[in-house]
Image (tube, rainbow, N blue to C red):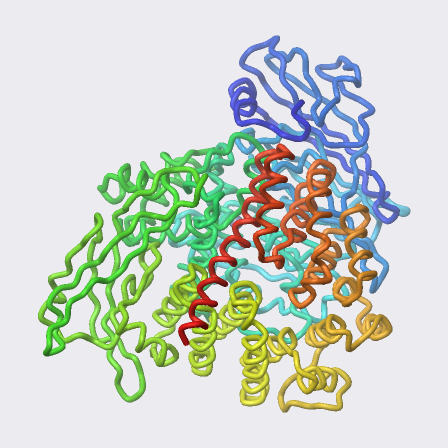
């Protein structure tokens, strides 16, 4: 029984049989204000290579009322198991399907949302990976492209946006009908529809004779916060940069960006109609790191218009290439586009993407970048740190290897050759080989077909005059966790070594050597005979993908002077190395805290500051020796208050420390300060206690029992928006009582009424590290419920629960034992198993790190 799954084999067979010409899709969304279902009528025209063959089309719908193939009505019993069986196709076919499809509240298919501010209904589609079939009957696989013509009936006064430009609506009375022009040939997963009383701001991209209409949309309740000009600026820079580097004009008729509610991902690259999560419309003050991340997302989706939408992967096993390319493209565009506000994007890349990749690559579920994707369930759990972040890191290494000019020449040839078609990895590698003259098969094998991270360590001998007698880069094979796929190999690395000296309190690079590291030992004769610098940094400039260790003397200098590197990238690399060592139990949590307390005082890159703040919190909660934990948490909270008071008024640093204190406050005085900031009796110069910060302050007061339900009610009156409702739900789940925990648990696990966002908020509130004892009893309940959740809920919703409610804060052997017992007895499906095994690995790692911290405590 396929359920909602589809195997690669089935997709291959169907692609060999069919060529799809077009879809005519009529949707009646007049029912949207009430919800329930909507009428969907699909007419598909397609040809078949083997007349008489049987095949099927995909549809997820409560009911079907008509199936007509080539003029003949088929029995409605052909619709079963999310498919409509087509018993015998002809050479040329026309299929008509009339169905009642359901609005969703999970962010998959056609999501329906009612804004509490105006009571209006807002819809948008999200189709990746296999959810177009929740809106119309579709051959749901990326290599069956077609032209799509949408005709939409919706309430008069609504705005309706799709891939083609929005036409004038026709009709009168309560509804209107929008008849869109057919799209160019595209995959089902990048078609889109956004409908509701959204508001838009318009502009255009002009380049010579080229004119591309630009639109930016959001709900009216967010309009006052929509900084459309800033969004258009980044978008135009992206158009300029990508059109030049790709040597291919933007391929669609217009470019709309729609900020939509309760969106699961960051954004989605629907052709010409990109959807983005509407937290990117900032309703409270955020730091520059948030603006940078939004700009990166905008550029990422824009790059997909070429890489993904114009030229599309044949099957989901090349998802990594799709996502890695867009992730690399966002960073290189920010680093190089004239006028970019974030030219230090490679620091952010090192700080965020690499950290994500390194973490994911050490989980038991790690896999080669080229993953086997046998079916849809495989791909849905594969939007991971390997697919996005390791893939992009390895592409960066590939660019260092072939040179950026050759890289883009190859990409240009690839777009010209495969425009509007589908490809596999060898199509791109072939184009890059032609452009660069290099054989990429060995490279591809080492980097794409194996899992894990190599460790690079320096080995050096210094003579009595302080000169380097020998310098060797040691490469270790990845320590693959038990059960991980692939063999552990050494790889060729193109790296730089940075030499840094202390001068006037700053750490300045005095020289840089670039070399190929290959095999277990690579001698570096260029360094022999030179004076030993203060810091020797392997993988400087972050060209390769490897865990890097510092020699003892360099580590000592970095511990005292991390904040003194004049350049942000080596700082980010050292921060990353320290974090990595903490996770590996090579650096005790208490020593990491000491490093953070000294280094953060001088760290100017706000994105790095915020990452380290999150990492310190995680380390204290998970990796600290429980006997010492409270002391560490107190030190951290005291430092947060001190930094908050010392920060420049109105600065990003001030805001970041205020948020940190809001999460860390423990003493009466600190909690009193939070309460005072909230009620206005305490003021910190320049700190705007705005909507979002108010909720952060209140959340901590509620979780510590300092504020009650009534305070939450009152806050919700001030901010009765969808975000306010989510915060309120989170606060209620965070109350330190057994009743509150039981209520939160039941609302998530025993009911499916919560929307994706409210559910996420409740889970976040439920899981409080300070409430370990209170939630300990839910370990058993979790294992009793998790399989049923997986089987009965949608993919997004079940993933939130499986990962979010795992007893992650119960760092003890009993949690590992309970997990193992469940794994042995429950016979979980591979995708479910993977999520639980990854969560288990977090506890196992925490136990090791706690032991390391305990040992350090005994030494100190
Ligand atoms: Zn993407």
Q: Nearer the viewer, residue 821 or 845?
A: 821
In the drawing, does residue 504 fall left or right of residue 453? left
**Which residue: 69% across, 73% down?**
696
Residue under the image location 57 percent in, 66 percent down: 621
User: Picture quarter containing residue 108?
Assistant: top right
Q: Residue furthest right?
A: 173
In the rendered image, residue 699, in percent from the top left (x then y), is placed at 73, 71
Q: Is residue 261 visible?
A: no
Percent from the top left, x then y, of residue 454? Answer: 32, 51
Confirm whether residue 228 shows in the render: yes
The residue most toward the front is 858
Q: Is residue 15 left or right of residue 98?
A: left
The total of numbered circles placed on residues is: 0
Relative placement, left or right, of 801 versus 431 is right
Q: Is residue 227 above or below residue 104?
A: below
In the image, 46 versus 485, the foreground residue is: 485
Q: Is 38 or 248 nearer to us in this picture?
A: 38
Residue 75, relative to residue 268: is it above or below? above
Quarter in which the N terminus is drawn: top right
Q: Quadrant of the C terminus?
A: bottom left
Q: Could you tell me residue 516's position as x and y percent?
A: 21, 53
The residue located at (35%, 38%) in the rendering is 487
Residue 500 screen position, x and y as percent: 25, 75
């Amino acid at each position: 029984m396929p359920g909602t799954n589809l195997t690669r084999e089935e997709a291959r067979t169907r692609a060999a049989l069919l060529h799809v010409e077009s879809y005519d899709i009529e949707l009646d969304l007049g029912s949207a204000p009430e919800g329930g279902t909507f009428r969907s009528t699909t007419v598909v025209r397609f040809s078949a290579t083997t007349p008489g063959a049987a095949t099927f089309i995909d549809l997820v719908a409560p009911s079907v009322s008509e199936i007509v193939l080539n003029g003949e009505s088929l029995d409605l019993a052909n619709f079963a198991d999310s498919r409509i069986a087509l018993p015998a196709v002809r050479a040329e076919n026309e299929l008509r399907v009339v169905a009642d499809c359901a609005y969703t509240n999970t962010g998959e298919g056609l999501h329906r949302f009612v804004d509490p501010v105006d009571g209006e209904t807002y819809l948008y589609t999200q189709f990746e990976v296999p959810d177009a079939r929740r809106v119309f009957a579709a051959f749901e696989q990326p290599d069956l492209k077609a032209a799509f013509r949408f005709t939409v009936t919706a309430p008069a006064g609504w705005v309706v946006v799709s891939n083609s430009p929005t036409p004038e609506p026709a009709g009168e009375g309560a509804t209107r009908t929008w008849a869109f022009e057919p799209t160019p040939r595209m995959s089902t997963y990048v078609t889109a529809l956004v409908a509701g009383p959204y508001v838009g701001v318009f502009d255009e991209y002009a380049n010579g004779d080229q004119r591309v209409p630009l639109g930016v949309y959001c709900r009216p309740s967010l309009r006052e916060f929509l900084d459309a000009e800033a969004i258009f600026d980044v978008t135009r820079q992206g158009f300029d940069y990508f059109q030049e580097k790709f040597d291919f004009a933007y391929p669609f008729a217009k470019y709309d960006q729609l900020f939509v509610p309760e969106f699961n991902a960051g954004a989605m690259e629907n052709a010409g109609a990109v959807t983005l999560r509407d937290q990117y419309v900032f309703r409270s003050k955020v730091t520059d790191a948030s603006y940078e991340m939004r700009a990166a997302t905008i550029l990422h989706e824009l790059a997909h218009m070429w890489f993904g939408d114009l030229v599309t992967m044949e099957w989901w096993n090349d998802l990594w290439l799709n996502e890695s390319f867009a992730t690399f493209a966002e960073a290189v565009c920010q680093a190089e586009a004239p006028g970019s506000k974030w030219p230090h994007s490679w620091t952010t890349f090192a700080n965020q993407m690499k950290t994500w990749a390194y973490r994911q690559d050490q989980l038991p579920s790690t896999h080669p970048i080229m993953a086997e994707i046998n079916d849809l369930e495989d791909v849905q759990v594969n939007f991971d740190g390997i697919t996005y972040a390791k893939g992009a890191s390895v592409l960066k290494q590939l660019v260092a290897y072939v040179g950026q000019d050759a890289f883009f020449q190859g990409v240009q040839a690839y777009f010209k050759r495969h425009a509007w078609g589908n490809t596999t990895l060898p199509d791109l590698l072939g184009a890059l080989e032609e452009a660069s003259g290099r054989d990429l098969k060995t490279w591809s094998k080492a980097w794409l077909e194996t899992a894990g991270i190599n460790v690079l360590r320096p080995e050096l001998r210094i003579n009595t005059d302080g000169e380097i007698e020998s310098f060797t880069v040691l490469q270790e094979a990845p320590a693959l966790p038990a059960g991980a796929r692939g063999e552990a190999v050494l790889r060729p690395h193109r790296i730089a070594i940075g030499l840094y000296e202390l001068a006037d309190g700053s750490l300045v690079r005095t020289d840089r050597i670039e070399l190929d590291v290959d095999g277990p030992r690579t001698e570096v004769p260029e360094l022999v005979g030179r004076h030993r610098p203060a810091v020797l940094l392997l993988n400087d400039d972050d060209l390769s993908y490897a865990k890097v260790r510092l020699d003892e003397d360099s580590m000592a200098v970095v511990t005292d002077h991390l904040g003194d590197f004049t350049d942000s990238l080596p700082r980010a690399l050292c921060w990353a190395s320290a974090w990595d060592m903490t996770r590996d139990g090579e650096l005790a949590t208490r020593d990491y805290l000491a490093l953070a307390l000294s280094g953060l005082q001088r760290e100017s890159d706000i994105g790095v500051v915020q990452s380290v703040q999150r990492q310190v919190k995680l380390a204290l909660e998970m990796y600290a020796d429980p006997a010492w934990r409270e002391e560490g948490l107190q030190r951290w909270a005291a430092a947060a208050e001190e930094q908050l008071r010392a920060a420049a008024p109105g600065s990003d640093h001030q805001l970041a420390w205020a948020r940190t204190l809001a999460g860390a406050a423990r003493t009466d005085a600190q909690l009193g300060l939070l309460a005072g900031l909230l009620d206005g009796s305490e003021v910190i110069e320049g700190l705007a206690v705005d909507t979002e910060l108010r909720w952060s302050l209140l959340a901590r007061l509620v979780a510590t029992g300092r504020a009650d339900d009534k305070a939450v009610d009152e806050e919700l009156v001030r901010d009765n928006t969808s975000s306010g409702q989510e915060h309120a739900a989170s606060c209620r789940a965070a109350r330190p009582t057994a009743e509150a925990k039981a209520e939160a648990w039941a609302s998530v696990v025993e009911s499916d009424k919560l929307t994706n966002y409210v559910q996420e908020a409740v889970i976040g509130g439920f899981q409080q590290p300070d409430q370990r004892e209170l939630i300990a009893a839910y370990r058993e309940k979790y294992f009793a419920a998790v399989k049923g959740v997986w089987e009965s809920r949608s993919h997004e919703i079940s993933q939130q629960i499986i990962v979010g409610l795992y007893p992650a804060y119960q760092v003890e052997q009993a949690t590992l034992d309970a997990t193992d017992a469940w794994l042995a007895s429950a016979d979980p499906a591979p995708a479910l198993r993977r999520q639980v095994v990854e969560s288990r690995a977090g506890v196992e790692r925490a136990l090791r790190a706690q032991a390391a911290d305990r040992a350090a405590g005994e030494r100190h």
